[in-house]
Image (cartoon, grey):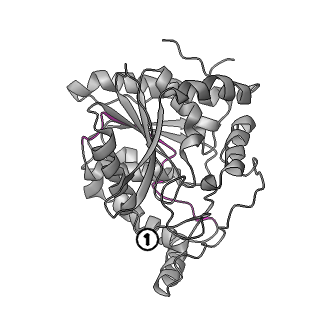
């Protein structure tokens, strides 16, 4: 079918009266116990006529409902959709009494949770992976540990290396180590804070103000969606995970076709790490979207249309090519006339 991607004007009405009622027909929200007994929330959108399923690995401080529009398009395209909320996010069990904090001591916990979700809840044979930002780091670690577990993977602005701003990476590591070793791992990392109820579209990763407002309104309405700042424990865990993710011997284990999207106006993750990844992982390709910011699914109209068209082309081609183990072609950014 020909996909129609919604523009800016009237977006809230489109979501309220078209997209949300549609996905609600398929939605199940439940939870499961992970490997260590932690309760992990998830959403399942089971399409009875699905040609496969998409498993979403969301980003830092995100939650299930943030992906309502993305889920709508996947369902429209004939896929079922599964989305676990990473521990400490959304309705999943929090790791500190302060619900605004994102805290973890071992990044592998995200990977173990993801594996439990796939083996206990999803179980479908024909699976594709869609991962954004922090969720991209979880996805790559999973593909390294469980090669061949997905037919294909789309990584959107993956967090293969984080940016630490004006603070040199080595110094950030030393500071995080100090706070952890002195028992202060649950303190907010430098520059991080709790949810302040103030909208900041200009400082966000979005170029669509309507989409930013849609997500922000859900944060205001639901305290489960207000995770907002990282702890020193989380920072240390991520910096350690970066090294494991980018080890040559781990990257060589990946045999899943991967399409990576990079944003030209990226301010949260280091694009150079993704370029290095593509150079080392044979079955990977890269799309550079020059005008985009971090959240390409919340970008301007031309970016979003190009983004989705290339995602669905990749999914269809990969489903056909996988039996032949073909390498996906590198795609260039497409700029469409409105």
User: Above or below — where is 150 with respect to 120?
Assistant: above
User: Above or below — where is 82 with respect to 317?
Assistant: below
Q: Is residue 183 left or right of residue 145?
A: right
| Residue drawn at 51 percent across, 78 percent down | 185
The quarter holding residue 82 reads top left
Q: Is residue 298 visible?
A: yes
User: Above or below — where is 141 with respect to 157?
Assistant: below
Mark 1 lies on a secondary structure that is loop
**Which of the pair 140/86 is nearer the observer?**
86
The residue most toward the left is: 324
Quadrant, the C terminus: top right
**Which of the pair 30/236 is nearer the observer?**
30
How many labels were placed on the picture?
1
- Rendered location of residue 304, percent (x, y): 60, 29
Density class for disc 1 (Cα within 10 Å; few <14, some 14-19, many ≥20) is some
| Residue drawn at 34 percent across, 26 percent down | 52
Most common SS among magenta residues? loop
- Rendered location of residue 8, percent (x, y): 73, 27
| Residue drawn at 47 percent across, 25 percent down | 75
The quarter holding residue 42 reads top left
**Which of the pair 56/313 is nearer the observer?**
56
- Rendered location of residue 50, percent (x, y): 37, 22
- Rendered location of residue 308, percent (x, y): 53, 27
Query: Is residue 175 on the magenta stretch?
Result: no
The residue most toward the top is: 1
Give the magenta part as a residue range. Answer: 148-165
Q: Is residue 24 left or right of residue 286?
A: right
| Residue highlighted by disc 1 | 105
| Residue drawn at 29 percent across, 51 percent down | 144
């Amino acid at each position: 079918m020909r996909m129609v991607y919604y523009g800016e004007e009237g977006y809230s009405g489109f979501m309220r009266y078209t997209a949300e009622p549609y996905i609600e027909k398929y939605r199940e929200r439940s939870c499961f116990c992970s490997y260590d007994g932690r309760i992990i929330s998830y959403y399942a959108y089971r399409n009875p006529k699905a040609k496969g399923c998409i498993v979403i690995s969301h980003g830092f401080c995100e939650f299930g409902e943030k992906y309502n529009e993305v889920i709508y398009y996947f369902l429209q395209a004939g896929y079922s959709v599964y989305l676990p909320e990473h521990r400490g996010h959304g309705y999943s069990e929090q790791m500190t009494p302060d619900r605004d904090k994102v805290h973890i001591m071992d990044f592998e916990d995200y990977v173990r949770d993801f594996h439990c979700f796939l083996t206990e809840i999803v179980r479908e044979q024909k699976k594709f992976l869609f991962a954004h930002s922090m969720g991209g780091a979880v996805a790559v670690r999973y593909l390294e540990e469980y090669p061949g577990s997905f037919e294909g993977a789309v990584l959107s602005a993956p967090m293969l290396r984080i940016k630490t701003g004006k603070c040199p990476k080595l110094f950030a590591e030393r500071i995080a180590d100090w706070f952890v070793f002195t028992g202060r791992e649950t303190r907010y990392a430098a520059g991080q804070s709790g949810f302040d109820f103030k909208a900041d579209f200009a400082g966000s990763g979005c170029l669509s103000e309507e989409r930013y407002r849609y997500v922000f309104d859900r944060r205001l309405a639901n305290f489960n969606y207000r995770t907002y700042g990282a702890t020193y424990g989380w920072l240390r865990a991520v910096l350690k995970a970066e090294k494991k993710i980018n080890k040559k011997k781990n990257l060589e284990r990946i045999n899943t076709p991967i399409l990576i999207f990079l944003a030209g106006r990226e301010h949260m993750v280091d694009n150079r790490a993704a370029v290095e990844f593509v150079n080392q992982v044979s079955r990977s390709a890269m799309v550079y979207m020059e005008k985009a910011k971090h959240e390409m699914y919340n970008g301007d109209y031309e970016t979003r249309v190009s983004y989705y068209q290339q995602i669905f082309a990749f999914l269809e081609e990969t489903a056909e090519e996988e039996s032949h183990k073909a390498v996906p072609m590198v795609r260039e950014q497409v700029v469409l006339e409105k």
